Image (cartoon, grey):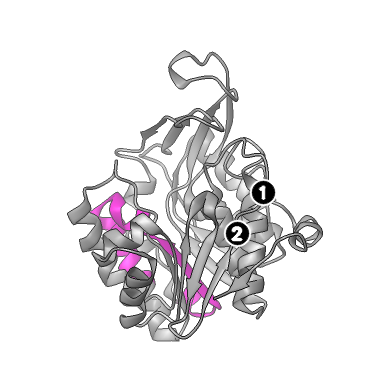
Amino acid sequence: MTPEVITFGETMGLLLAQPGQPLEHAAGFRRSLAGAESNTAVGLARLGHRVGWFGRVGDDPFGRSALRTLRGEGVDVSRAVVDGSLPTGLLVRDAHAHRPIEVCYYRSGSAGSALCGDDVDGGWIGRARLLHLTGITAALSDSAKAATERAVRAAAEAGVPVSLDPNIRRKLAGTERWVELLRPLADHAELVLTGLDEAETVSDRSGERAAATWFLERGAKLVVIKLGSRGAWATDGAEEWFQPAAEVPAVDPVGAGDAFNAGFLSGHLRGLPVPESLAEAATVAGSAVQIPGDMDGLPDARLRDLAVGDEQVTAR
């Protein structure tokens, strides 16, 4: 069946240090997956949605494991490409609840960065209900940027809405380059899911309302600004909503934004009002941060429904 949501980007192998061990001194690691788009894809699949992901992985243990894991989660990877000449990217990091997390990327020359326009199945995208993307993919390489542009054009031609998470990674590019990459993508985004710093960077405006207004002026219908431990704020230009973060013990905050995206998009796809979608997003993100790893704590629909009643949302 055609996926409801299609997303794309680089999925990498993840070597996660044992919880609490600084990366420099870590002696033991657990192997898993990392990648903003595939994190969100798995989150949506666990919540009961049909999801497709495409990208490039190497013909190596990390690449084969990535595709096998995504298939096992119910994600359609039929358009993924196995690159026989380039390796799967690798991310190595530690996990701490109350100190900075150190992350090392080994993605230069990776299969994921070789994503190109020919890898984009425009007809597949055109049959979906939503295309979700992050700025990371466009920042990987010129060919990945071209693939991103082609995917967005395919969605526009078919009338498929686009959701955008800027997901700025300073190790990939400087501020000027991020602005150059993200502003054209923002012109096509009906839904924006962004951190405050990212929104201010792209818009060159300070404060959540001013930054959100910039996106609305460019055609977005709804802007959701993720405020970390403070919660999230959203506006459609007429109304505003605020959602506190879930009060949970945070073991590993990495991936919280991707989990939030999955929860919000799930509510959005099911036609829930913005306040209820925000509450679900907070619940899913709160579940994810309690377990080490990018995907391990993502809940299924049953666990989400048990927890979401405890969340509160206020309009203002």
The circle drawn on residue 247 is 1
| Quarter of the rendering containing residue 69 | top right
Residues tagged 1 and 2 counted as in contact (Cβ below 8 A):
yes
Q: Residue at point 20% right, 55% down?
A: 177
In the image, residue 3 above or below residue 89: below
Image coords of residue 173 (percent x, y): 24, 47
SS class, disc 1: loop
Q: Position of residue 58 (x, y in %)?
A: 44, 41
Give the percent coordinates (x, y) of residue 130: 52, 75
| Residue at position x 26%, y 71% in the image | 184
Please, what secondary structure does the residue beneath circle 2 have?
loop
Residue 117 visible in the snapshot: no
Residue type beneath disc 1: Glu
- Region of the chain picked out in magenta, as a range: 123-151
**In front of the other: 98 or 292:** 98
State the residue position of label 2. Answer: 244
Residue drawn at x 74%, y 56% as measured from the top left: 300
Could you give the CA–CA distance between mark 1 and mark 2, rounded to whole angstroms? 9 Å
